[in-house]
Image (spheres, rainbow, N blue to C red):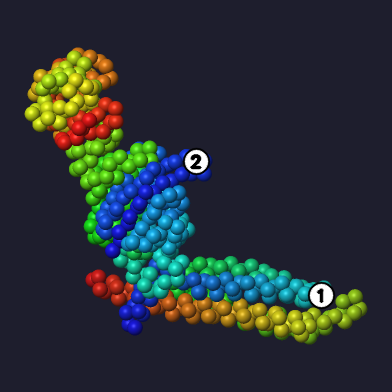
Amino acid sequence: MNDERTTRLDRMRFTKNKMSANLALLAIIFNVCFFINIYESDVGSWYYTILVGGSILYNLIFMLAAFLSSEGIKNYKIGYSYLMIVLGIIQIVRIFIYPMKAHGAVVTIQEQAVTVMEGGQFIRVVLYLVLSAACLFAGAIVGIIRSRALAGHLATLESKVA
Amino acid sequence: MAELKIQHVDKIYDNNVQAVFDFNLDVKDGELIVLVGPSGCGKSTTLRMIAGLEDISAGHLLLDGKDITQAPAKDRDMAMVFQNYALYGHMTIYENMAFSLTLRKENPNVIHKKVLAAAEILGLTSQLNKKPSQLSGGQRQRVAMGRSIVRNPKVFLFDEPLSNLDAKLRGATRREILLLHKRLKATMLYVTHDQTEALTLADRIVCMSMGHVQQVGTPIELYDAPANKFVASFIGLPPMNFFDVTVREGMLEGKGFTVPLTEEEKGILLPYAGKQIDLGVRPEDVAADGSIDMKVFSNENLGMNTLIHGHIGGSEAVSNKISAKLRGWCDYREGDNVGVSFSRKHFFDKESGNAIRKGESK
């Protein structure tokens, strides 16, 4: 059993952390689903249009950062795991920035009352953000565990050589 | 345990071109067989038929007594190393070596151990995280070999694996293959057109020409006792000299020269008295201490030896051309006359080209 664990650790010297990397990419996909859905709430109110615009800008930054994390974590760079945790937290915070404000809010457009975000859209948007955050957390945790395990294994190997 | 029997194998392509004629060979367990011959002689086709990459038109292929003539390549338990390495450029060396086992869904830990063991054998441990493009040709060929080793096949097949390497690297990689064979004690079939590779690597050589097996034997058998003129001319560097001669009483008579015969040679050539034969003399069997006149036209110093080229018998006919490999550093000039003798002679039947040997009558 112990030998099996050592072999598993040793394997990491030559294999990539594909699970964490793929989870980061999945987080990006859920984020894309989120921003496709959020456009439906651009009903013409300048306040919510600005919020949607801000969200789009952040989406670009998020996708870039998540993709970089995906590449970094693939090579067991622990710093990118922490970056993924930060990105995950921001995804949760985003629920309170736009969807919570827009959900059920009514604005008057051309003398007509319009609901900014209906219940169904709200559930979808929140679900995508939660799933995106969950992927980032899971990927980060796997990344931290594996990176630490690999670092420990490499230290053991080095001490054996010394 | 891996014994391969190739019985009466033919290869006929769809356009009715026959590439291989009645190929027969018994490969013993742990033997390294080299198939050698000029380009287009059918050696690679034979190897590809054994690997299952080409259909066998006729005959049988048996591995450990089991008929695998119709078995698909993947079920033959053989691994092939190609001339062009056939590595996946986007994968690391580790992934390349592990690939075939990954496809078979073997336990990743088992794969890991096999890859590390193969890398250790081939001296590739420090290269495992690199991509093929970061390695030299010799290293890439070692990776290709490693990919075969991890599969632990019954038979290794090498199709001109050193042809893409420069001369120095070829020598080094050749020695590695030899060491690998000694270490793994595996059955190997190796195709090459380079007779140096054949002589240095083989337990036995199969010399081929025009789809026919010309001779099967140990390297020394092919060198010392070639079965026919083709084998005699193909094995040995520089190639054997051939002269048209007539068998006379106690000697051979050529164009402007005579060669005395020993008692044993007289006995061998008795049935050929008065007839024309081909006399073969290896350049290294020519000594500069005889009575046959040789007019030098070029002198190549190779360091330990000197290669001189010229004509014998005062005739500049092509059939009187001779190359001699003399020991030491010599400085002959164009037009110099040297008296040469032949320490060893080979005789070939003029019509069939077959070697004339003791106890064989015409």
Question: Which image quadrant for residue B240?
Answer: top left
* Residue at left offset 58%, top offset 67%: A64
Q: Which mark is residue A43?
A: 1
Give how far apart the Cα atoms at labels 2 and 1 are.
76 Å
| Residue A63 falls left or right of residue B310 | right
| Residue B153 falls left or right of residue B254 | right
Height in image: A119 above or below B137?
Answer: below
Residue denoted by label 2 = B16
Residue B338 visible in the current orientation: no
Q: Which chain hosts label 1?
A: A
Image location (x, y in percent) of residue B350 = 27, 26
Q: Viewer-proximal residue, A80 or A48?
A: A80
* Residue at left offset 80%, top offset 80%: A116
Quadrant position of the N terminus of chain A in the picture? bottom left
Image location (x, y in percent) of residue B260 = 11, 23
Q: Which chain hosts label 2?
A: B
Q: Residues within 10 Å of mark 2 (few under 14, many from 20)?
A: few
Height in image: A151 above or below B234?
Answer: below
Q: Residues within 10 Å of mark 1 (few under 14, many from 20)?
A: some
The amino acid marked with disc number 2 is Asn
Q: Secondary structure at mark 2?
A: loop
Question: Which image quadrant for residue A58?
Answer: bottom right
| Residue B200 falls left or right of residue B50 | left
Image location (x, y in percent) of residue B73 = 44, 58
Q: Viewer-proximal residue, A144 or B84?
A: B84
* Residue at left offset 25%, top offset 53%: B178
